Image (cartoon, coloured by chain):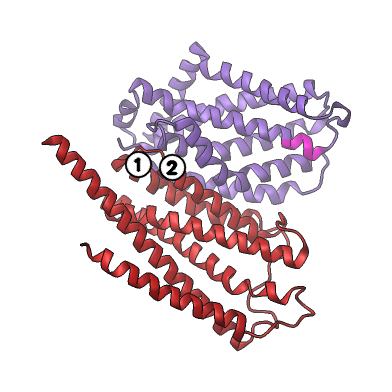
Amino acid sequence: MNSGKAWSIAKKDLRSELRSREGATTLVFLSLLILFVFRGILDPRLGARDPALVAGILWATFFFVGTVGVAGTYGRERDRGTLEGLVLAPGGAFAVYLGKLAATAALTVAVNSLSLLFLGVLFNYDFGGVIVLVWLVMLAGTLGFLSIGSVIAALVRGARSRDALITILLIPITLFSIVMPSVSATAALLGGSGTLTSNLYTMVPATVVFVALAYLLFPFVLEE
Amino acid sequence: MKEGDRWGPMLSVAWLGAGLVHVALAFLWAPDPRSTSWADPIAFRIFFFHVPLAWSGYLAFGIVFAASIVFLRTRNARWDHLAVASAGVGVVLISLALVTGALWQEAETGEYWRWDDARLFTTFVLWLVYLAYVALRSTGEGGEGEARMAAIYGIVAFASVPISFFSVRLLPALHPPPGSREYMTPVFVAVLLVGVVVFTLLYLLLLRHRLALLKQALTLEEAKQSLEGA
């Protein structure tokens, strides 16, 4: 039953997104703007040949796109007063979490894939054959980030300053367990120092712990 | 007069006495460490304050975690008050631990901050996380909603600390490893223990004051509401 409810919620969110494109438009534009800012503030002569630099720029983009992406999902339900319906539907609170997470992740991963393309064009950077692996690390990092980001977004959905709060609450929790290992793993793939596996050994358990926390706490999170 | 008002000043004065004894012990009784292993024997005495500050700060955050869980289960506002008071005091204590650590680091190595020190890194994350908790409590939402929000964040926040520690485990341990150095003489351990007791008492004292303040704010709020209702 749980998976049925989660699936329905994910489908509903994605259908609504496909019709309005309100999330995607903002996120794609945001991604372009962040990359433009990096292009603008960095000396073009430096080029983007340093793997650590490319990985850092990529993840700064993914990070902010993810934060804005996750902020919308629960905020919109709250504004339209439809969250109550999702909670009351049989299947439990965790199914709401999973469904929302799936929809947000689909949207964010799609935008992040575009960001990879944008970075390649704007910085004239050739990923070469590792692009598939870089994409997989992006997938793992984004899922890890959103796994706890969804909890925070749902938690502060009713607060007046919810967008600022999501950033404030999410950065300290994920910076060291998800974002930095993701940067490090990406840099390793692009030929920098560090190893892929040791960083995955941090990100994957962290994601599992975050999902477990969501399972335990989501019934409390959804209370009104 | 509330009972807290009567005992508060007396406890503060008593603590000040204990704190002065600790300062005297740390600077007069404890011998210099072997000068070969430490660049600055005077700065070394920061240890007697730095470690107890960090300890009492960790304790404060542990209390936030425990109180958050109990609040979610019982919905008794008293536990929420304990969590918010403990978080505020904890942030102050950890801030001081970070500052004293940075000063000591500077005296020893000439650098205030080293990003490759795993324990400093973890403590810094902890500090950020609870600063965020305090920010969450300062949004002015108020009431049961804010308390529930904060309690859940208090649990997530505490759980994120070991994860952060895990994620920096590959960094070299630049921090002095506890219990394995020549400076751990019986006198040294005794002064350190006095420090731990003194700073744990400081935590409890500040917590008590903070709780009394919260209680007064609540009484004021109730009085205002009853006036508006009348």
The residue depicted at 36 percent of the width and 57 percent of the height is B210
The spot of residue A45 in percent (x, y) is 89, 28
Is the residue marked by circle 2 packed among few (<14), some (14-19), or many (20+) residues within 10 Å? many
The residue depicted at 85 percent of the width and 26 percent of the height is A44
A4 w.r.t. A148: above or below: above
Check whether the beta carbons of the residues at disc 1 and disc 2 lie within 8 A of each other. yes
Please tell me the colour of chain A.
purple
Question: Disc number at residue B146?
Answer: 1
Is the residue marked by circle 1 packed among few (<14), some (14-19), or many (20+) residues within 10 Å? many
Residue at the extreme left of the image, as rendered: B230
Please give the count of numbered marks on the rendered protein: 2
Magenta span: A51-56
Q: Which quarter of the picture shows residue B64?
A: bottom left
The spot of residue A21 in percent (x, y) is 53, 14
Q: Which residue is mark 2?
A: B136
B125 w.r.t. B204: above or below: above
Residue at the extreme right of the image, as rendered: A45
The residue depicted at 57 percent of the width and 39 percent of the height is A145
Chain of the residue under the numbered disc 2 shown in the image: B
What letter labels the chain drawn in red?
Answer: B
Badge 1 and badge 2 both on one subunit: yes
Q: Which quarter of the picture shows residue A183?
A: top right
Quadrant of the rendering where the C terminus of chain A is positioned: top left
Sequence-first tag of 1 and 2: 2
Secondary element at image label 1: helix
Whether residue B179 sits left or right of residue A116 in the image: it is: left
